[in-house]
């Protein structure tokens, strides 16, 4: 009778292998990513991975983990591999059709919370370019009596946004519709939020591969100067806001003067800029001139 010796791989061993592979592919933060991916392959929390380096990994778990690591070596972000991203401490599904939500965009949520301290307010919110729905759905969670509409040109992105609304149990207050920004929209919303694509076309090639290869191009490309979408939006707002409404726009680094000018020319005044965690002006708050004049 012959004896078959099967080498059982441990968490510590396979993590070491992954770290080397990720280092070879010049992936920064390889150790952290490997832990996250292994925790997912094993269906345990990351703390288990740290606490049990001697625990064994099954063949199926190892195969799944190896596939994850190979994808990460091709610069696919961990969030894309796992299909989810945390935003404002809430879980969001993401898909190839949606932008991977960025922590910078939380500046927009903070701005709204500051301006509308009454969490019981029955606000009506319009989110133009909703993607995964992260901005709109986060606000609907923060304001349990609010109602919102999310618009996106991508049908696939809207499916993901609807799934997120269902996961977060706000389907009765979140409505999603396909459209080109606010074209043809009529209404009297209290606030409009938007994080439009704002990367100048010529800058796309210089983005990190994690962004350039995996975020949808239509979520990034902002035209020649990066501000094309703000021009379109500025020409549309009037049709779907009331005089006391506020508009919250996320912008790219250094775009504040240009966006302020575009909005001013369309009849809106900037009342505040909010910075992201890096101290960059990220969210502009605009209102109509009449409101400030008191008329
Ligand atoms: C920068 S992403 C923002 C996504 C999401 N709001 C977020 O903050 O993560 C811009 C979004 O605008 C959408 N978009 C691009 N062009 C559009 C258009 N003409 N009309 C409506 N949405 C558009 C993209 O599909 C993408 O979902």
Image: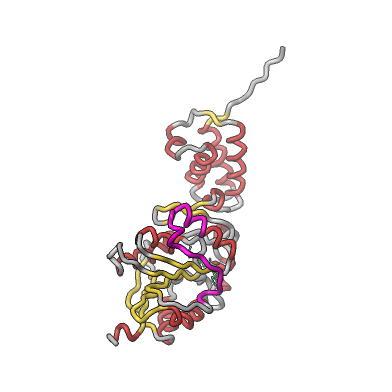
Q: How many marks?
A: 0
Asked if residue 245 lies left or right of residue 157, the reply is left
Residue 115 quadrant: bottom left
Quarter of the image for the N terminus: give it.
Answer: top right
Residue 162 position in % (x across, y down): 51, 59
Residue 116 position in % (x across, y down): 30, 68
Residue 63 position in % (x across, y down): 62, 37
Judging depth in this view, the residue of 64 and 124 nearest the camera is: 124
What segment carries the magenta color?
A: 162-182
Q: Residue furthest right?
A: 1
Asked if residue 50 lies left or right of residue 292, the reply is right
Quarter of the image for the C terminus: give it.
Answer: bottom left
Against 270, residue 149 (above or below) is above
Judging depth in this view, the residue of 23 and 165 nearest the camera is: 165
Against 192, residue 264 (above or below) is below
Q: Residue at x 38, y 72 (%)?
A: 191
Residue 55 position in % (x across, y down): 50, 29
| Colour scheme of the picture | secondary structure
Judging depth in this view, the residue of 107 and 70 nearest the camera is: 107
Against 246, residue 36 (above or below) is above
Residue 248 quadrant: bottom left
Q: Residue at x 61, y 32 (%)?
A: 59
Query: Is 165 inside the magenta-drawn segment?
Result: yes
Query: Is 2 inside the magenta-drawn segment?
Result: no
Q: Residue at x 60, y 48 (%)?
A: 71
Against 133, residue 12 (above or below) is above
Judging depth in this view, the residue of 100 and 174 nearest the camera is: 174
Q: Residue furthest front?
A: 172
């Amino acid at each position: 009778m012959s004896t078959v010796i099967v080498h059982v791989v441990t968490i510590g061993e396979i993590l070491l292998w992954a770290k080397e592979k990720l280092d070879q592919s010049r992936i920064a933060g390889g150790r952290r990513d490997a832990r996250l991916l292994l925790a997912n392959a094993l269906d345990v929390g990351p703390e288990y991975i740290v606490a049990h380096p001697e625990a064994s990994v099954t063949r199926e778990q190892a195969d799944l983990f190896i596939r994850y690591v190979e994808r990460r070596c091709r610069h696919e972000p961990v969030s894309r591999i796992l299909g989810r991203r945390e935003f404002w401490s809430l879980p969001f599904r993401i898909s190839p059709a949606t932008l991977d939500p960025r922590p910078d965009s939380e500046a927009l949520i903070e701005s709204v919370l500051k301006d509308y301290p009454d969490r019981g307010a029955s606000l009506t919110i319009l989110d133009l370019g909703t993607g995964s729905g992260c901005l709109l759905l986060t606000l609907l969670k923060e304001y349990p009596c609010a109602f919102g509409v999310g618009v996106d040109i991508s049908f696939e992105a809207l499916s993901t946004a609807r799934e997120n609304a269902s996961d977060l149990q706000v389907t009765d207050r979140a409505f999603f519709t396909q459209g080109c920004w606010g074209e043809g929209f009529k209404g009297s919303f209290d606030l409009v939020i938007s994080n439009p694509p704002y990367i100048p076309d010529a800058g796309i090639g210089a983005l990190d591969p994690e962004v350039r290869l995996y975020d949808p191009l239509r979520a990034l490309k902002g035209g020649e100067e990066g501000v094309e979408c703000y021009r379109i939006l500025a020409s549309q707002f009037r049709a779907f806001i009331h005089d006391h409404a506020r508009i919250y726009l996320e912008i790219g680094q250094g775009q504040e003067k240009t966006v302020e000018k575009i909005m001013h020319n369309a009849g809106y005044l900037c009342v505040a800029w909010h910075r992201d965690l890096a101290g960059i002006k990220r969210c502009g708050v605009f209102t109509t001139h009449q409101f400030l004049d008191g008329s």
